[in-house]
Amino acid sequence: MLNNWLLAMAQNAEAVRKAQEELDYVVGSDRLPTWEDENNLLRLGGYFRWNLGILATNDTNIIHPVQSESCSHHGIRPFVPMSIPFVLIVGAGPSGLLLALLLGKRGIPVRLLEAADSLDDRPRAAHYSPPAVYELRRAGIIEDMEAEGSFLPNGACWRKLNGEFLAAVSSPGAKDANQTPLTCLPLNKLNVVLQRQIDQLPHVEILHSHKVTALSQDDTKAWVTVETPNGLQTLEAQYIVGCDGANSKIRRSLFGAREFPGFTWDKQIVATNVYILSFEKYGFDWDSNFIIHPEHWYMAARISNDGLWRVSYGEVAGLSFDELKARQPAKFKAFLPGSPDPGDYRVANFSPYKVHQRLAKKMRVGRFLLAADAAHLCNPFGGLGLSGGIVDVGGLYDCLAGIYTGQADDSILDIYCKDPETALEESEFLKTCKKAETDDAVAASQRKGLEALQYDFTRHYRK
């Protein structure tokens, strides 16, 4: 057995390097590992179980490979299985990646499943409100975001269709460095930052082309059935988090395919990302602009430093994707400053969508949890959808980390899953809104109400 071990390690230098990184990360250099470290030494634990259980030799004493689709991911032949993670996350969008990064940096074992074969590279949303920026700071990625081109927008204004300025409000942090700022970076670039940092963590495993098809749980663990390139697999964890978007398989499996309470607005919106110079040319000196008009209303926001703008506008309901796409050049000519022709700009992304106001019946069912778009949908204007999802992740991270370290028990997750029927009595944000209806002083200070979107779950840790 020892011979097999030594031979396997000699043939897999990269696996040895990763195992040493894990030892350094978990144990450090001033002591030897103990049994208390076992659950945190994922790779080493997998290597030992592999050696004891599935490693075989022939009469020439050469390792006989046992094939698995994950061999290349772990950097060893044959496959070295990961120990059962504490948390399994479904969906490698920004919320799933951020939760994996926060947990992984705490040394908590995480496995992340993504149905697609790669990260989403569409720019999509781009604005992070102060509560979301707080969580991104906790994750330690602000400097990396800046390196990718993030910036602090100067604020938002309202204009008439002819560009005439009406009013404006400065962004948090734009004039006061002591405020947590509003920050802008397209989501595809945020995903790159998150992925890059996750790749450095020995406790986090990302599996692409893994599509969840079913789920179940008992008193001690939860599990999902997953379609993989090599067939169906069952993957387990103590907790499973659905970060798999508006069409969440986790949510639909828990509550039913059509059970997502709320409503959908009957208006059609088209979101585009456009490289265009006419905004600066015609005096659009605010980074976000809301144009007021009964027919040609739209929002134009700068989302990068290289000329990329998000232009979202209203359209006629009931049209197909192709019909909306065909109408886009005429729409831009009708409402964008300078009436540009298609040769004056380049559309990088075209995404028709409807606006939803929906909330799952519960954000927790036993050992399954929901976060971000899998749990709730809202009007995305102003970054509300993106920021709400990130704040979910920050709170859920505190809950799961508290359970893992023994600072909180499982009941803290019931606080994460508050009943919306009692929201007015328990939400500081909604209480503030209610007071602002009749108290001018409260209304004047309500810009600080954004901070109430956050909730300090560490208040419920054991003292």
Image (cartoon, grey):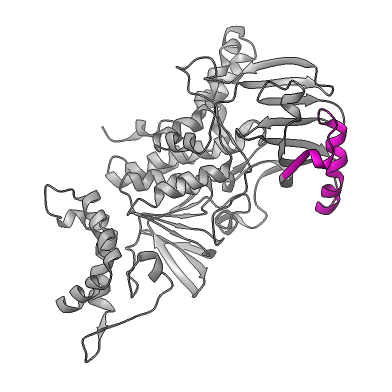
Apparent side of residue 396 relative to residue 203 in the rendered image (left or right): right
Residue 292, compared with residue 46, is above or below; it is above
The answer to which quarter of the image holds residue 279 is top right
> x, y (%) of residue 192?
50, 47
- Residue at 80%, 21% in the rendered image: 163
**Where does residue 360 sit, x and y in percent of width and height?**
59, 46
Note whether residue 72 is visible: yes
Q: The C terminus is located in which quarter?
A: top left
Question: Where does the N terminus fall, quadrant-wise?
Answer: bottom left
Is 34 situated above or below 316?
A: below
> 205 above or below 454?
below
Give above or below for 237 relative to 276.
below
- Residue 115 place in picture, x, y as percent: 55, 61
Judged from this view, the residue extending furthest toward the left is 31
The answer to whether residue 327 is magenta is: yes
Chain part drawn in magenta: 318-347
Judged left or right of residue 96, residue 374 is right
What predominant SS class does the magenta segment belong to?
helix
Report x, y in % for residue 146: 48, 34
Pick the front one: 337 or 133: 337
Q: Nearer the viewer, residue 377 or 132?
A: 132
- Is residue 409 something that shows in the picture? no
Q: Is residue 292 left or right of residue 57?
A: right
Q: Nearer the viewer, residue 328 or 136?
A: 328
Residue shown at 33% from the left, 81% from the top: 65
Considering every residue shown, the one lying at the far top of the view is: 441
Q: Is 121 part of what is drawn in magenta?
A: no
Q: Quadrant of residue 353?
A: top right
